[in-house]
Image (cartoon, helix red, strand yellow):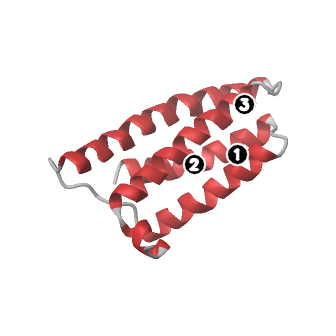
Amino acid sequence: MAPENDDSENPLVALGNTLALVLRAIGTAQKGLEKNPSKEEERELNETLVMLERKRAEIRAKLNALIAGGRQVVSPTAAQVKEVSRLTAEVEALTNASITASRAVALTSKILSLASEIATA
């Protein structure tokens, strides 16, 4: 079995992990909307959902381009890969715990910020 570090340096793996994180964030935001959010939390979650869907499409396009070999794709940095792992663990912990609307807002905002960096690189 290859060391974990080798996989994290592979652009396909890194972008795939980022895409999986964005999809989990979408689910987290949707769950947050079910937890009686305030009007402000509901607005933030809905805006974040729209932006996460956009980033999902951008990251998927980068993955497709990388697979097709049609254009040069910038891979996430080592720091971004580490942050994807950290946020993935945070989403998993939140999924197993009781989620609140405010917690969903905070977490999905962090994920959106990271996804934006990776998608636009």
Q: Nearer the viewer, residue 12 or 39?
A: 12
The Cα–Cα distance between marks 3 and 1, rounded to whole angstroms, is 13 Å
Could you say where residue 32 lies in the image, as x and y percent from the top left?
Answer: 74, 32
Q: Would you call the spot at circle 3 few (<14 residues within 10 Å), some (14-19), or many (20 or more)?
A: some
Q: At 57% across and 48% down in the image, what residue appears?
A: 111
Please report whichever mark, 3 or 1, sits nearer to the chain's N-terminal start: 3
Specify the amino acid type for callout 3.
Lys
Numbered disc in front, either 3 or 2 = 3
Label 3 sits on residue = 31
Q: Which mark is residue 111?
A: 2
Q: Which mark is residue 106?
A: 1
Q: At 32% across and 46% down in the image, what residue appears?
A: 63
Apparent side of residue 121 relative to residue 19 in the rendered image (left or right): left
Specify the amino acid type for callout 2.
Ile
Could you say where residue 110 lies in the image, as x and y percent from the top left?
Answer: 61, 50
Vertical side of 4 occupied by 40: above or below: above
Could you say where residue 104 lies in the image, as x and y percent from the top left?
Answer: 72, 40
